[in-house]
Structures are given as C-alpha cells and as structure tokens.
Image (spheres, rainbow, N blue to C red):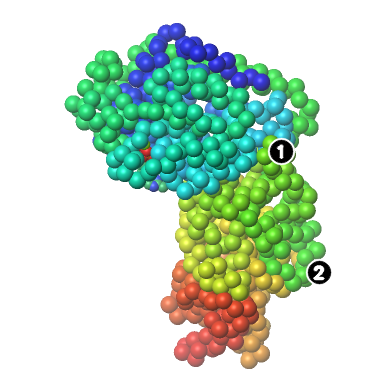
Amino acid sequence: MDSPPTPQASPISKATDQELANSIRALAMDAVEAAKSGHPGMPMGMADVATVLFTRFLKFDSSDPAWPDRDRFVLSAGHGSMLLYALLYLTGYHGITLDDIKRFRQLGSPCAGHPEYGHAPGIETTTGPLGQGLANAVGMALAERVLNARFGDCLVDHKTYVIASDGDLMEGISHEACSLAGHLKLNRLIVLYDDNGISIDGSTSLTDSTDTLMRLEAYGWAVSRVDGHDPKAIAAALDAAQSATRPVLIACKTVIGFGAPKRAGTSKAHGEALGAEEVTGARAALNWPYAAFEIPSDILSAWRETGARGQNGRKDWGLRLGGVAPALRESFANALSGDVPGGLALAMAALKAKLSADKPTVATRKASEMALEVVNAAVPETVGGSADLTGSNLTKTKNDPVIAPGTYAGRFIHYGVREHGMAAIMNGMALHGGLIPYSGTFLVFSDYCRPSIRLAALMKQRVIHVMTHDSIGLGEDGPTHQPIEHLAALRAIPNLLVMRPADAVETAECWEIALKEKTRPTVMALSRQNLPTVRIEHTDRNLSARGAYLLKESDGPAQVTFLATGSEVEIALAARDILQRRNIGARVVSMPCWELFELQDADYRVQLLDPASVKVAIEAASPFGWERYIGPSGAFIGMRGFGASAPYKELYKAFGITAEAAAEAALARLKKE
Ligand SMILES: Cc1ncc(C[n+]2csc(CCOP(=O)(O)OP(=O)(O)O)c2C)c(N)n1
Ligand SMILES: [Mg+2]
C-alpha cells in the first residue's frame, strides 16, 4: 500500500547517516551528563540502526502522531530512553523540546527516566521493566492484523518495529510473547535486537549461552544478523523484512557506548554519565565538534525532513478513509474512539431484569459468560481470550471465531499457557487502539500477570482480566490454586479496579463498568462455585458503580453491619437472618469494588458503613486491608493462612467461614459494648 520506498542510500542529502546518528549520540551523552544519571550506552550503540529505521522505513508523520495507520515504534529497552527522546525531538514531534531534553529525568520533564506513555506524543508505551515493551509490541502487531481483517488494507496496513536488548530477550516474558507471535505468524512485527553482548554485570557471557537467533527461529521467526554500525547492511535487512511471512528478528551487532574512548564496549557505558573527559573524547572520536546540546541547523533540518517524510502517505490515507463506505468509516471511527455503543446500557439493563426475575443459581464465572453474550453482541471491539483455561474461565461466547495463524478475523485468542505474555499482549492491543481486550485465567495466577497489570494501571489502559476460581471455593485443586492474598495484592495497585461480584446481576453490572472505564484496567474475581441470585429486585441503576451499597436493610435499628464481597455475600445474608431471628437488627453491605467505593463522597461512605454499628467483614481471603472498614473493634471472617484440598463446602466449614461464625462474631462484640 503506501509503505515508504526503501532505497539503499539515505534519501536525505543534507546530512550523512553518520551525522544523523551522531546527533542522537551527542544528545544522549549531553542529557545524561546534565542529569548526572541515565543510560548513554544503548542510544550511542543503536544510533545507526535507529537512524536507518527512521529515515528510510518507519511510516510516520511527526505532525500527526496519532495517525491511526502509522507504524508503531517501541523502545523496549526503555533504559535507553534518550534514544527515543532524541528521535522525537529531532524529527519534530510537538511534545519534546530541546529544553525538555536538557531537563532529562527532572520533575515535570516529559523526558522521564524511562519512556512513559502519555508524557509526550510518539511514546507508544511505557517501557523499562525489560521484556514488557517487546510483549506489548506483539499485542500491537496482533491488533493491527485483527483490525486489518475488519477494515481492510485500505485503512489498516502498518508495521510494528521494536528495539529490544539482551535483557529484553533474557526475560521469560519474551518467550511467551515471541512464541505466540511466531505461532500467529505476525509478519509485520520487526524486532531490531541490540546484540551488544553487554548487560549491567558485564559481558552477557557471564550468564547466557543462548543462541538467540536459533531460539527465535525455533519459534517460527525469520532471523538475520547484521553489523549494527553499517547503514547499508541494516537497510538491506530491513528491506528484506518488509516482505517477510513471519515475525522478524534482526540481530544488530553493536558496540555499547559507541564513540566513548574508554567506556565503549563495556558495561560502564550502560547506566551512568560518561564524565567530562570521556564526553570530550567521544566528541573527538565521532568528529562532532559542536557544543553540548547543539545540533547544527543542516543536520536538524535533515531530521525534520525525515519527520515529514510520511506526510503524503498520511494524506493519501486520509483520502482513502474519505472514500470508503460511510458505514465502514463510522465503525472505524467508533472503534478508535474507544466509546462503548449506547446500546450496551439498554442491553445490560434488560439482562439484569431477566436475571432478577429468573434468579439463577450460577457461578459468577458462568454469570460472566452470560453477560459476555450480551456484551459481545453489543460491543464489536471486544476481543476475548484465555490462557488455556477457556472452559473454566468461560470467556469464549458462542459465536466467537478464533484468531488463528493467518486468520485474524476472529474475536477470541487462545493465548496458551502464557499468563504473563497474555497480560502484556493485551496492554499492547489496548495501546494500539480500536480493540478492547479481555482474557481469562485463574485468580491465583494473577501473580503471573502482575507486572503487566501494574503497567496497564500506570498507562491508564482498559484491559479486562477475568480471573475465576477466586477462593477456597474452588475446592479440590487445593492450596496451590486457592488465592488468599491475591485480592489484597491487586487492591494495592493504584488505578486498578478489583471487582468481586456477588451474583449474576452484580456480574453484569461489573462488566458494564469495566467496559465504560476508558482509563482503568479491571480484574474481575469470579467464583467457580454456584451462588444464588441476591439481587432479586430489579433496578436499571448500576448499584455496583458505587463500589459498595446496602443490599439488605435491617429490620429495626441496626446494631450490626455485615460487609462482604462475592461468594461471601450469601453468607452475610444468612448471618443477618440468624441475628434478626434474635431481634438484633443487622444490615448487609455488598462491596463488589473497593476502589469505586473509595471514590464516593464522605457522607455516602460514612452512612453506608454506619459507624454506630458493629462491623463484621466476610471474605474468603486474607484480612489484609479490611481493617480500614471494620476498625479495631470489628471482626473478620476469612482466611488466616493457606487453604486445603477438599470439597468446597467442607472447606468453608473447616476454615470457619460460615453464617453461624459471622453471627457469633457479631454477638461477641455486641456483648463487649
Ligand atoms: C525486569 C527488569 N529487571 C531488571 C531491570 C534492571 N536493568 C535495567 S537494564 C538491565 C540490563 C542491561 O542489559 P541490556 O538489556 O543488554 O541493555 P544494555 O546494557 O545493552 O543497554 C537491567 C538488569 C529492568 N529494567 N527490568
Ligand atoms: Mg546488552
């Protein structure tokens, strides 16, 4: 389509490849020197590769960083952030100025220590935790293919380029993400591997004997090796990559800290300022006689030309968009807007009314499947998946075709047993735009996804994790599979919604909230075991949206408030009945989402928790965090250690998570008063 031409010599006449690359090197050295902290080695080593990529291959237009059909560029080795900041400044993105670069790593500068999504246009994802960017890129490349299948070459036809380091490829997540990319034949994914043989501790030979090319080849990738300081060789490899039928890894042999007289090729170049003497020496060696932060105008204008190189392509794309059928254009715009269709609210209200009338006794994972049937019919952007637990997570609805190698028109991804990769790939899909990824695994394996969930929260991305088998209620699989501390650990992540619905109605409500949350990821903790419908009176209002609400008022003055989530709401209701039979007024508060509750005004929170009443919290998990709601005098009914293997009803009894125990705890505290 409109891929840029790929001539073998730099199309920019005013400056040589070397001058262009040296301007990156100089900015990196100078910024790190000014900050007295940072990583000069990687940008200096990969400057030649980045120059070839940006001047001849990458499809972008710095005046329109959000152009949907731009190529994505991911600097997975985020410690080399100055490479990206230099490129964004030099190519003319509005968002990073020379002054910002002079304030590298200082408070308020978009040039943060590691690239942060949202700090400046052109930063496609937050990187730094090694391996994550590479896995995000797999998600971006997958999203591109899925959207291409929906909207055609005419609107979606771009590539995803990655710069990845030794560390990126050593991380386990790179296995998960790259093996899936190979399986799915994501041939528009092109990784430039900074094969410098150095990491922080010294030579990579200290710890690694992997033949990385053989490894990636075994995953189904096309691999090649080039001298990373030879523009012609780099261009030839990138040229060949354009027509690949598989994902591509180009190992670029480079010298870390290229140009620094003493530190080049050593781990000393990795992560500290070079020092005045070394910087002076590098300037001489690189034949770069200019002052700190000075970029000669002919070199800067050559870079700016590069930044505008994609303008015609972008304009042509705009014309094509204008020329497609209006319905296609509209659905493309809807997908990119990230808004959920207005019809969702009505459809969910109808589902809730039916559920409240039918009162099904179903596991909330089953209720999630029921909700998803409605969601997926109303929201074309959702793309589901599971890490090899599809039949347990129930994330695949009836009419979801599977996304398979070369066949991307589906809506469901078999991620395989790759939880970490799955979560990072989902982040990449969300960052790409146009899709809403959701997935499934067991809640206990949230630990395997946690670094990526944290980054989704940091980047404000809407990804939805369906995590089933959410307590000892899963029964016989035993303590290895029974989450205990996981809810507390997830609740500790800022900007993450942790939802634990009590029944089918709350589950539908939670799905609606998660879909509408454009700037927060959600983990939905769902039961394996059946639960009764507790919301038997229908209201169109989404009660779960307040995070916690009064499910059952007391008869008579309230002396006790039971607080519960998920499968333990049923137990709270039964405990209330025990007390009411003894004429003790007790109310039940369902708390499907603490984070949303914390956002309510103080009046609502105080009233709901009713300071005058004795508080008993019930959750088949760690008590960690409940102190804030029950106070020093309240009681907690839940887990104090790991679970055990047995039928779940026996486990609830054995661990004392029963209505009787909850009622007893309340009575004991009432007596003390
Ligand atoms: C998950 C993770 N672990 C550890 C680090 C700390 N760290 C930053 S860079 C790096 C390794 C550096 O080696 P390499 O990736 O080859 O980068 P180079 O020194 O070649 O630039 C490490 C361990 C990190 N950023 N992320
Ligand atoms: Mg390295």
Image coords of residue 282 (percent x, y): 25, 22
Residue depicted at x 61% and y 54%: 387
Visible in this render: residue 613?
no
Outermost residue toward the left in this view:
277
Looking at the picture, how far across and down is residue 423, in whole percent?
55, 49
**Vertical position of residue 273 compared to residue 569: above or below:** above
* Front position among marks 1 and 2: 1
| Number of marks in the rendered image | 2
Displayed quadrant of residue 582: bottom right
Q: Which mark is residue 358?
A: 2
Q: Give the left or right position of residue 455, taking residue 299 as reference.
A: right
Left or right: where 182 falls relative to 80: right
Local crowd size for mark 1, using a 10 Å CA cut-off: few (<14), some (14–19), many (≥20):
some
Q: Residue at x 53, y 58 (%)?
A: 446
Classify residue 330 by image quadrant. Answer: top right
Q: Amino acid at mark 1?
A: Thr
Residue position for label 1: 407
Q: Is residue 43 left or right of residue 186?
A: left
The answer to which image quadrant residue 166 occupies is: top left
Residue at x-position 33% and y-position 30%: 256
